[in-house]
């Protein structure tokens, strides 16, 4: 579940929980709204947690020493902290 879908679940859940006064036989729409908001919040938290743990884009520079043939790699981290 991505960040956008999590926000969508939060919005739909909030609408059902707080703005809908409709009663449906056998279904509590306010409870469905709260469940959707909980699922959206959990999805948002997990998406943000995995997004920050993902390595992202890094620049890698590889140099080969012409005399020894030794290869050295340098990783430049472009993430802003």
Image (cartoon, rainbow, N blue to C red):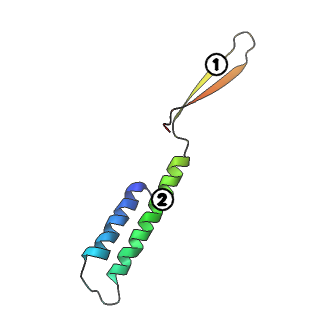
Q: 63 or 36, which lies in front?
A: 36
Please tell me whether mark 2 sits on a helix, a strand or a loop.
helix
Residue 53 disc label: none
Vertical placement of residue 63 versus 66, above or below: below
The residue depicted at 65 percent of the width and 25 percent of the height is 73
The residue depicted at 43 percent of the width and 56 percent of the height is 2
Residue 63 disc label: 1
Q: Are marks 2 and 1 in contact (CB under 8 Å)?
A: no
On the image, the x and y values in percent for residue 36 come to 39, 71
The residue depicted at 51 percent of the width and 33 percent of the height is 78
Of circles 2 and 1, the one toward us is: 2
Vertical placement of residue 73 versus 65, above or below: below
Q: Residue furthest bottom?
A: 25
Of the 4 image quadrants, the one containing the N terminus is bottom left
Please tell me whether mark 1 sits on a helix, a strand or a loop.
strand
On the image, the x and y values in percent for residue 49 come to 52, 54
The residue depicted at 69 percent of the width and 14 percent of the height is 65
Q: Which residue is mark 2?
A: 45
- Seen in the image, is 9 located left or right of residue 21? right
Mark 1: few/some/many CA within 10 Å (<14, 14-19, 20+): few
On the image, the x and y values in percent for residue 80 come to 48, 36
On the image, the x and y values in percent for residue 11 come to 32, 65
Occupied quadrant, residue 38: bottom left
N-terminal label among 2 and 1: 2
């Amino acid at each position: 579940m991505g960040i956008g879908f999590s926000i969508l679940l939060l919005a739909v859940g909030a609408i059902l929980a707080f703005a809908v006064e409709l009663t449906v036989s056998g279904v509590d729409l306010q409870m469905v709204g709260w469940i959707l908001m909980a699922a959206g919040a959990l999805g948002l938290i997990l998406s943000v947690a995995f997004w920050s743990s993902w390595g992202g884009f890094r620049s890698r520079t590889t140099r080969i020493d012409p005399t020894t043939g030794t290869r050295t790699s340098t990783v430049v981290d472009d993430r802003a902290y």
